[in-house]
Amino acid sequence: DADVTQTPRNRITKTGKRIMLECSQTKGHDRMYWYRQDPGLGLRLIYYSFDVKDINKGEISDGYSVSRQAQAKFSLSLESAIPNQTALYFCATSDGLRQFFGPGTRLTVL
Amino acid sequence: DAKTTQPPSMDCAEGRAANLPCNHSTISGNEYVYWYRQIHSQGPQYIIHGLKNNETNEMASLIITEDRKSSTLILPHATLRDTAVYYCIVRVLYNNNDMRFGAGTRLTVKP
């Protein structure tokens, strides 16, 4: 969905490096999410935010942190990347009824 | 704790109807049935949702059994572009963190 953008689209990094994945949306939604997808599996929720002052942990938040800089921006950070964080990462927004996903960021940690 | 059960894979001939089943025997009275799909490695796309009545939109139809323990997503005239992984999810409306994606059903539409 072009209303939800993610940068970068692909990233290769090394173990121990700090990485930030960024998400922007023009849908005007308050609710934003970060998911991770491993090969052959469904998406798992990392963090979500109801509004700028709200941050909540999801199923698998260990090793990750987030920042909600504005209604339209929600960033995911890996403070010290490790190889098992190699995955496809999706940002999403929601109007409460439906979720709208970005194109994903493919992250490889060597 | 998977709330839904779906077959891992299905095939369908192009132009025919694709019927994707989902079991959700422990669904609660206030939980809706949602369907999303993911084409290749793109972000999932919303398809349809319903509570207990059958629903239809421009993409698909959703048939929910009377006891609400199972449902079927119907793509009336499948095309090659409908090849994707289809996820059945049960959730409460406006709840913020209960989207649980299982492994889904990989639908392959064949010419």
Image (cartoon, coloured by chain):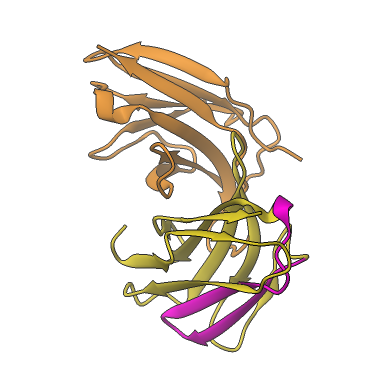
Chain colours: A yellow, B orange
Quadrant in the picture for the N terminus of chain A: bottom left
Residue B11 colored in magenta in the image:
no
Vertical arrangement, residue A53 with respect to residue A4, above or below: below
Q: Position of residue B89 (x, y in %)?
A: 56, 41
- Residue displayed at 41% across by 37% down: B40
Q: Does residue B35 appear to the left or right of B3 in the view shown?
A: left
Q: Quadrant of residue B56?
A: top left
Question: Can residue B37 be seen from the camera position used here?
Answer: yes
Please tell me whether residue B43 is drawn above or below residue B75 in the rendered image. below
Residue B30 in view in this figure = no
Give the x, y percent position of residue B9.
Answer: 52, 18
**Residue A81 within the magenta-colored segment of the rendering:** yes
Q: As displayed, is residue B7 above or below residue A3?
A: above
Residue nearer the viewer, B68 or A94: A94
Q: Residue at x 51, y 77 (%)?
A: A74
Residue at 46% over, 32% down:
B85
Q: How many marks?
A: 0
**What range of the chain is rendered magenta?**
A63-84
Residue A78: x %, y % from top left: 67, 70
